[in-house]
Amino acid sequence: MTNVAFLRTRIDYITDYFSEGEIDEIWLTFSDPQPKKPRKRLSSPLFIERYRQILKKGGIVHMKTDSNLLFEYTEEEIKEKYELIESTWDLYGDITADLDPLTREIFHIKTHYEQLFTSRGSVIKYCKFRIG
């Protein structure tokens, strides 16, 4: 993949690393569901506002998770505030031939933990949404 950056830092400082409107897409992969602290979930309004600052107009957020709690929370946030593009509760069970080749290629990239969790029977959820 070209024009891709992976940044390992505290998400609290994301706006320090990117200019306004610099980013096309953000991927949230297997973030902590923060069961006792909804405000700290990476799909909470607190973080979405930070993403909005650095995303281009019409920018997209992707999320992959094995957490039902985080996925349900994010679906509710999307329903109330954002534009849902795609959502599935079983990413690898729902992959179809209709996906474009790049998307198929991206979904074949699995983190160490994703491989570990799926080998133990965890179902991976995915959603794609536009925050405006």
Image (tube, rainbow, N blue to C red):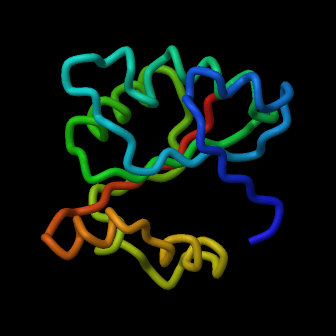
In this picture, residue 33 sits left or right of residue 13: left
Q: In percent of the image, x 55 and y 78: which residue is there? A: 104
Q: Residue 43: which quarter of the image?
A: top left
Query: Which residue is outermost to the bottom?
Result: 97
The image shows residue 89, relative to residue 110, as above or below, that is above
In this picture, residue 55 sits left or right of residue 60: right
What x and y, as percent, mark residue 18?
80, 32
Q: In percent of the image, x 40 and y 25: which residue is there? A: 77
Q: Residue 123: which quarter of the image?
A: bottom left
Q: In percent of the image, x 36 and y 35: which residue is there? A: 75
Q: Considering the image in quadrants, where does the C terminus appear? A: top right
Query: Which residue is outermost to the left?
Result: 120
What x and y, as percent, mark residue 22?
85, 37
The image shows residue 77, relative to residue 8, as above or below, that is above
Closer-to-camera residue (126/29): 29
What x and y, as percent, mark residue 49?
61, 18
Q: In percent of the image, x 44 and y 79: which residue is there? A: 96
In this picture, residue 120 sits left or right of residue 25: left
What x and y, as percent, mark residue 36?
20, 19
Closer-to-camera residue (110/7): 7
For the image, the number of numbered tags is 0
Closer-to-camera residue (125/29): 29
Q: Considering the image in quadrants, where does the N terminus appear? A: bottom right
